[in-house]
């Protein structure tokens, strides 16, 4: 990834607002989140201290930015900005003539993002504590709206994309990253096992294939849809694969912690099945952990001016 040499410390307000340099205090407001969204916020609050150790998230963010063809003086909305991987790289690209807004529901992730932005002395980044599905920006505000690593967590993806389209300028581009339904060996295995016990939580179900991503964007009203496919898989050890069990407790859309629905006896049996299926996949190289990823893009019509 390109080395970020310098960034910006505040956001220059556009669309007729008075220009000013500032970084919105992240704790200035509290979000009213439902149980599912609060669980998501709690998960990422806990992960904030070591989130930047993940090379995966950095690579996905960088690739999404590359595919988005960003240039000055673009205005960019970074959805679920996390620790600002996308926001920081984009801010470097657009420079002082462009603007970047990053939103997230995790206060701790945003705190890390703010420290990074300040340490880099950046000046066109605004960070907001906000729910990506209930945003309230002026219509026709952004040239690009990007969402790396978090789009499958949205509760109503089609409605959310329609809302984001409203914020795009005509001919603006929305782009998100999603995993294929074959990706992440641990996730694939425990989803199949859970289904045997009547618990369905397929994070990739609405976006798990190229066709599903395309159809979703088309139903939301986007044009010139383009889906890029890349493989980020690798061989991992059995021990690393077994550690993926912890992901099974993550909340998913329309389903809170799935483990809470099961008895201790069921959980013990499921964990044993999980380990056994992983052990059966071991090769001399380890266990193949598929990383098929989609980078999905759609344009707002050039004549589509939202009022």
Image: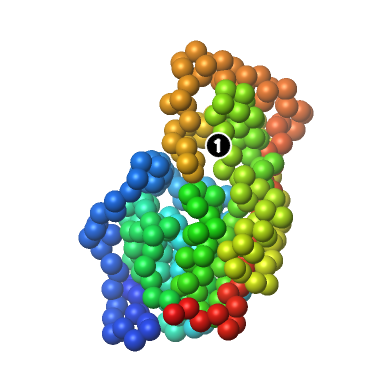
| Spot occupied by residue 298 in the image (x, y as percentages of width and height) | 62, 68
Q: Is residue 116 left or right of residue 296?
A: left
Q: In this figure, what is the number of numbered marks?
A: 1
| Residue drawn at point x = 67 percent, y = 58 percent | 215
Which scheme is used to colour this image of the protein? rainbow
Q: Is residue 153 above or below residue 278?
A: below
Dot 1: what SS?
loop
Residue wearing tag 1: 201
Nearer-the-camera pick, 78 or 298 = 298
The correct choice, above or below, for 302 with respect to 293 in the image is: below
Is the residue marked by circle 1 packed among few (<14), some (14-19), or many (20+) residues within 10 Å?
many
- When the figure is inspected, residue 289 is found, relative to residue 116, above or below; the finding is above
- Answer whether residue 231 is visible to the viewer in this image: yes
Q: Quadrant of the N terminus?
A: bottom right
- Percent from the top left, x then y, of residue 231? 71, 51
Q: Quadrant of the C terminus?
A: bottom left
Snapshot quadrant of residue 183? top right
Quarter occupied by residue 83: bottom left
Q: Residue furthest top?
A: 265
Please name the residue shown 63% across and 39% down the image. 184
The image shows residue 156, relative to residue 89, as above or below, that is above
């Amino acid at each position: 990834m390109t080395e970020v040499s310098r960034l910006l410390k505040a956001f220059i307000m556009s669309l007729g607002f008075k220009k000013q340099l500032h970084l919105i205090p992240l704790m200035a407001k509290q979000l009213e989140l439902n149980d599912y969204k609060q669980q998501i916020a709690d998960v990422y609050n806990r992960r904030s201290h070591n989130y930047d150790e993940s090379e995966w998230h950095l690579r996905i963010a960088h690739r999404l930015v590359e595919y988005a063809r960003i240039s000055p003086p673009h205005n960019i909305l970074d959805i679920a900005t996390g620790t600002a991987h996308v926001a920081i790289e984009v801010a470097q690209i657009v420079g002082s003539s462009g603007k970047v807004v990053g939103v997230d529901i995790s206060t701790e992730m945003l705190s890390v993002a703010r420290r990074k932005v300040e340490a880099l002395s950046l000046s066109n980044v605004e960070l907001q504590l906000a729910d990506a599905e209930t945003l309230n920006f002026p219509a026709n505000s952004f040239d690009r709206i990007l969402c790396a690593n978090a789009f499958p967590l949205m509760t109503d993806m089609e409605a959310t994309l329609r809302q984001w389209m409203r914020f795009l300028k005509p001919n603006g581009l929305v782009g998100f990253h999603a995993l294929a339904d074959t990706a992440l060996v641990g996730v694939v295995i425990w989803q199949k096992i859970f289904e045997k016990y009547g618990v369905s939580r397929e994070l990739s179900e609405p976006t798990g294939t190229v066709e599903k991503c395309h159809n979703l964007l088309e139903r939301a009203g986007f044009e010139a849809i383009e889906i890029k496919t890349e493989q980020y898989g690798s061989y991992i050890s059995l021990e690393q694969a077994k550690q993926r069990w912890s992901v099974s407790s993550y909340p998913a859309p329309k389903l809170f912690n799935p483990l809470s629905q099961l008895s201790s006896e069921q959980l013990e049996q499921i964990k044993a099945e999980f380990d056994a299926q992983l052990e059966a996949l071991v090769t001399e190289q380890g266990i193949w952990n598929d990383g098929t990823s989609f980078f999905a893009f759609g344009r707002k019509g050039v004549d589509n001016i939202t009022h």
